[in-house]
Amino acid sequence: SQQGEEDPQALSIQEGENATMNCSYKTSINNLQWYRQNSGRGLVHLILIRSNEREKHSGRLRVTLDTSKKSSSLLITASRAADTASYFCATRGQGAQKLVFGQGTRLTINP
Amino acid sequence: ETGVTQTPRHLVMGMTNKKSLKCEQHLGHNAMYWYKQSAKKPLELMFVYSLEERVENNSVPSRFSPECPNSSHLFLHLHTLQPEDSALYLCASSRLLAGGLDTQYFGPGTRLTVL
């Protein structure tokens, strides 16, 4: 299975701190994407990193990709209460048409 | 707003009912998806339509029947469902690129409860 696995399953931090979530996968990928989901809502795309990229930034988000370890991390800096949500990584395999999602990390930012 | 709408947002149905979920995208995309999200399970891909043709059916029971009449609309017809089918059903759309399918944009979902 190519399924991504996020770690930790749940993370609770204070507002202003940085939050780091990790994702591991099993097979070669074309790209890896991170999505956010607020409770009971649809997923929102955050950032895409291609297999030939090592790091990407978008605002307070920083994503790294290590294809040798088949892992990625999402860092949210200076967290805010509004960042409270579930975060999912999704991988698209080489030549594959679909994304495979992990189970997600539930992030809680305490005011 | 992501440009993908779903109706209804909430649906309660009995096991003998027939209902349909509707998804519409306003992004000019040409691929659409149905996902099922149950508690404590990864997001499950159910169906993929690319250029209005079904390209993926992930062993979904026949009580779920998708329909894609055009590139902007996607339906999921439901009949004789079971209580374990209760879940959040998410629709998504994306562009179809030469190297595969692009970033997906999700609707808000339909919360389905089967009694």
Image: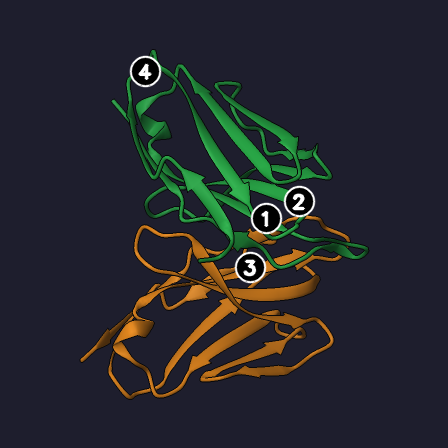
Chain colours: A orange, B green
**Label annotation for residue B31:** 2
- Which residue matches tag 1? B93
- Residue found at x 66% / y 39%: B71
Frontmost of labels 1 and 4 is 1
Contact flag, marks 1 and 4 (Cβ < 8 Å): no
Disc 2 sits on a residue from what chain? B
Q: What is the chain identity of the residue bearing mark 4?
A: B
B15 horizontally vs B103: left or right: left
- Which sits earlier in the primary sequence, circle 2 or circle 1? 2
Closer to the observer: label 4 or label 2? 2
Label 4 to label 3, Cα distance in Å? 33 Å
Residue found at x 34% / y 11%? B16
Q: Which residue is labeled 4 in the image?
A: B15
Residue B49: percent from the left, percent from the top?
66, 37
Query: Could you tell me the amino acid type at mark 3?
Result: Ala
User: Mark 2: which amino acid?
Assistant: Ala
